């Protein structure tokens, strides 16, 4: 089997993009669920105390897939903690992987830091890292405001804005196919 999508999403932006990729690639998809439900407060504590919230097992074995596409938000410059836990648990079972995030955006140096974190967590260099910036979907006067960015819920019509970056991952899929 070729691709597997594994995602975490708190307010469903990353869930929507994960489902979009699943439809494009016709592949298996799994949602990471935390053992204890996250709230805004528990996320804050996760960040403050660098906690690793326990996550449930998914019904797929990663080693059976040539390429896993991980999808999750960025929180305070880092990969959302539930995916972090998952990557630490599963790193030995990952062959090739890419990472996609629907994040607030606006910080050009974030992507390199996220890539570094991925390598630290998995011990492997990702095939692709793609950031889809919510701030690019907002009118210019709202792009810098945290409330507007974190409060935005992406719509199917927004996917066209991200088309070029989405294609990067879909093209990579062709590489895996060869
Ligand atoms: C506590 C918190 C911290 C965040 N920090 C960042 C950040 O450092 N960089 C960024 O690009 N986006 C940041 N965001 C924005 C989220 O990544 C963005 O809202 C994302 O689309 C949420 O994904 P979800 O709907 O799948 O949960 C943050 C959001 C929250 C709630």
Image (cartoon, grey):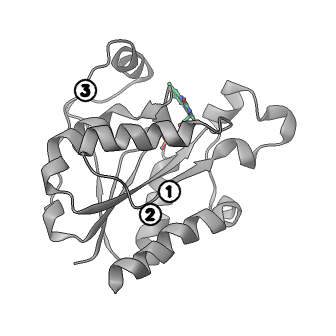
Q: Is residue 82 above or below residue 18?
A: above
Residue at mark 1: C-beta within 8 A of ligand 1: yes
Q: Is residue 23 above or below residue 124?
A: below
Say whether mark 3 is within 8 Å of ligand 1. no
Compared across the picture, whether 47 is left or right of 134 comes to left
Please name the residue shown 34% across and 84% down the image: 177
Q: Quadrant of residue 86?
A: top left
Which image quadrant for residue 156?
bottom right
Quadrant holding the N terminus: bottom left
Residue 21 place in picture, x, y as percent: 46, 68
Give the class, few, some or many, for how many residues have Cα within 10 Å of label 3's Cα (few <14, many ≥20). some
**Within 10 Å of the Cα at label 1, are there few (<14), some (14-19), or many (20+) other Cα atoms?**
some
Residue 26: percent from left, percent from top: 37, 78
Horizontal side of 72 relative to 107 (left or right) equals: left
Which residue is located at x 86 percent, y 33 percent? 141
Evaluate if marks 2 and 1 touch, with contact meaning CB atoms under 8 Å apart.
yes
Q: Is residue 57 left or right of residue 46?
A: left
Which image quadrant for residue 157?
bottom right
Residue 15 is situated, as x and y percent measured from the top left of the image, at 45, 52
Does residue 60 appear anywhere in the picture? no
**Distance in Å between CA atoms under marks 2 and 1:** 5 Å
Residue 120 lies, with reference to residue 175, above or below; the image says: above
Which numbered disc, 1 or 3, marks the residue that appears first in the sequence? Answer: 1
Label 2 lies in ligand 1 vicinity (Cβ under 8 Å): no
Of labels 2 and 3, earlier in sequence is: 2
The residue to which callout 2 is attached is 19
How many angstroms separate mark 1 from mark 3 (CA)?
A: 24 Å
The residue to which callout 3 is attached is 52
Q: Nearer the viewer, residue 68 or 111?
A: 111
Q: Which residue is mark 1?
A: 16
Residue 66 in the image: x percent, y percent? 24, 71
């Amino acid at each position: 089997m070729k691709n597997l999508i594994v995602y975490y999403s708190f307010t469903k932006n990353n869930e929507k993009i994960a489902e979009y990729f699943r439809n494009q690639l016709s592949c298996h998809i799994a949602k990471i669920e935390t053992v204890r439900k996250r709230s805004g407060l528990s996320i804050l504590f996760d960040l403050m105390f660098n906690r690793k919230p326990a996550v449930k097992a998914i019904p797929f074995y990663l080693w059976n897939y040539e390429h896993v596409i991980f999808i999750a938000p960025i929180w305070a410059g880092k990969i959302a903690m539930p995916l972090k836990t998952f990557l630490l648990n599963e790193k030995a079972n990952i062959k090739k992987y890419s990472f996609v995030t629907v994040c607030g955006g606006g910080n050009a140096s974030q992507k390199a830091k996220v890539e570094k974190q991925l390598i630290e967590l998995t011990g492997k260099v990702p095939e692709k890292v793609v950031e889809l910036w919510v701030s690019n979907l907002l009118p210019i006067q709202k792009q810098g405001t945290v409330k507007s960015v974190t409060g935005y819920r992406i719509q199917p019509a927004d996917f066209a804005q991200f088309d070029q970056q989405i294609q990067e991952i879909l093209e990579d899929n062709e590489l895996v196919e060869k």
